[in-house]
Amino acid sequence: MKSNIIFKLVALNLMLIVLLNSCNNDSKNDTIYTIKTFSVDSSGWGYDIYKDNKMIIHQPNIPAINSDQSFKTKNDAQKTGEFVIKKLENNIFPPKLTKEEVDSLIN
């Protein structure tokens, strides 16, 4: 009877260890995306996107339009960068933007 209780305690401890270990592994696989806006030649704004503190996108101009025009406001750059991050979080690679998406974000 005593050995049966010891066996159950050991089994319970092993299950707890496995459960805690799997929770730790899940959190290690979480990717963290961040955005930082920046001024572009005092004429506008752009954004950088970081994946786990490493820059993966440098966007000094408005994507999906055929010009070198930067964002007019910091807020426009921020909103667009956040939209790109949502695409990345939804495993859309590359997170290419259409002109219609950009128009809806900055107009």
Image (cartoon, rainbow, N blue to C red):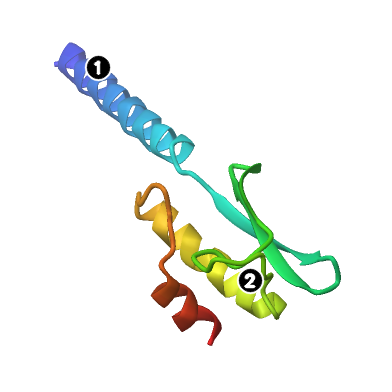
Tell me what residue is drawn at x 60 percent, y 68 percent.
62
x and y, in percent, of residue 7 in the image: 21, 16
Q: Which of 37 and 71 is in front in this view?
A: 71
Tell me what residue is drawn at x 20 percent, y 22 percent.
8
Residue closest to the far bottom:
107
Badge 1 marks a residue whose secondary structure is helix
In this rendering, position of residue 94 left or right of residue 59: left
What amino acid type is highlighted by mark number 1? Ile
Badge 2 marks a residue whose secondary structure is helix
Q: In this view, does 75 lie above or below 24?
A: below
Q: Which of 61 and 30 is in front in this view?
A: 61
Q: Is residue 75 above or below residue 22?
A: below
When asked about the image quadrant of residue 37, the answer is bottom right
x and y, in percent, of residue 44 in the image: 76, 74
Tell me what residue is drawn at x 39 percent, y 29 percent.
21
Tell me what residue is drawn at x 53 percent, y 87 percent.
107
Q: Which of 51 and 22 is in front in this view?
A: 51
In this rendering, position of residue 84 left or right of residue 50: left
When asked about the image quadrant of residue 55, the answer is top right
Q: Find residue 6 and name its label.
A: 1
Mark 1 against mark 2, which lies toward the viewer? 2
Q: In this view, does 98 lie above or below 12?
A: below
Q: Find residue 77 and name its label.
A: 2
Q: Find residue 56 and name its label.
A: none
Q: Upstream in the sequence, badge 1 or badge 2?
A: 1
